[in-house]
Image: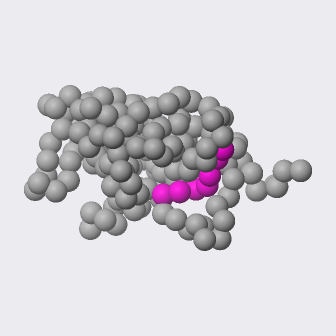
Amino acid sequence: RLPLTLAIIDGMVVRVGRHRYSVPILNIVISVRPAPKDLSSIANRSIMMRLQEELLPLHRLSDLFNIAADTADPTQGTVVVVENDGRKMALLVDEILGQQQIVIKPLGEALRGLPGISGAAVMPDGRVGLVLDIAGLVRLTESESN
């Protein structure tokens, strides 16, 4: 028997350090490896990425979730540009592992309400990965920058 609270989405599985996350395909605009000329620093604090004449805030997923990444240099990792309600941002990940349909399972009471996370999923290798809530990540990054 399956609980009625399960949902199935198409997701892009990304890796940051030893952690795996699923980004809903509907929120992905593009994934790129930026060149140094596409990146600029603002007040030595935040990084912006130029994408087709648009400046986007670049956030390291490792910093947002306080985990270790294999790369901190955006030119050595992969940047996934995501959008929610017309607001775009760029997320730095170590690599893209592939696309798959994912069954989202709700988080338990202890983890419910975590900003930027909408649920969990069992990955093909049997490990658990978290499903990103792009709307929550946009709100989280906007509140941190204020």
The answer, for residue 64, to whether it is visible in the render is: no
Q: Nearer the viewer, residue 71 or 107?
A: 71
24 is higher (above) or lower (below) than 110: above
The quarter of the rendered structure image containing the C terminus is bottom left
Q: Main secondary structure of the magenta part?
A: strand
The answer, for residue 125, to whether it is visible in the render is: yes
Q: Is residue 106 magenta?
A: no
114 is higher (above) or lower (below) than 121: below
Residue 11 horizontal side relative to residue 36, left or right? right
Query: Where residue 49 appears, x then y in whole percent?
Result: 23, 40
Residue 75 horizontal side relative to residue 43, left or right? right
The furthest residue to the bottom: 110
Q: What is the basis of the colouring in this image?
A: one colour
Q: Nearer the viewer, residue 38 or 63?
A: 63
Residue 12 horizontal side relative to residue 121, left or right? left
| Residue at x 41%, y 43% (from the top left corner) | 16
Please provide the residue range marked out in magenta: 116-122
| Residue at x 37%, y 37% (from the top left corner) | 94
The furthest residue to the right: 1
The furthest residue to the left: 43
112 is higher (above) or lower (below) than 117: below
> On the image, which quarter does residue 53 sit in?
top left
| Residue at x 47%, y 38% (from the top left corner) | 14
118 is higher (above) or lower (below) than 16: below
Q: Nearer the viewer, residue 144 or 18?
A: 18
How many marks do you count on the picture? 0
Query: Where residue 67 appears, x then y in whole percent?
Result: 39, 54
Residue 24 horizontal side relative to residue 122, left or right? left
Query: Where residue 102 appears, x then y in whole percent?
Result: 66, 40
| Residue at x 45%, y 44% (from the top left corner) | 18
Query: Where residue 73 appears, x then y in whole percent?
Result: 23, 39
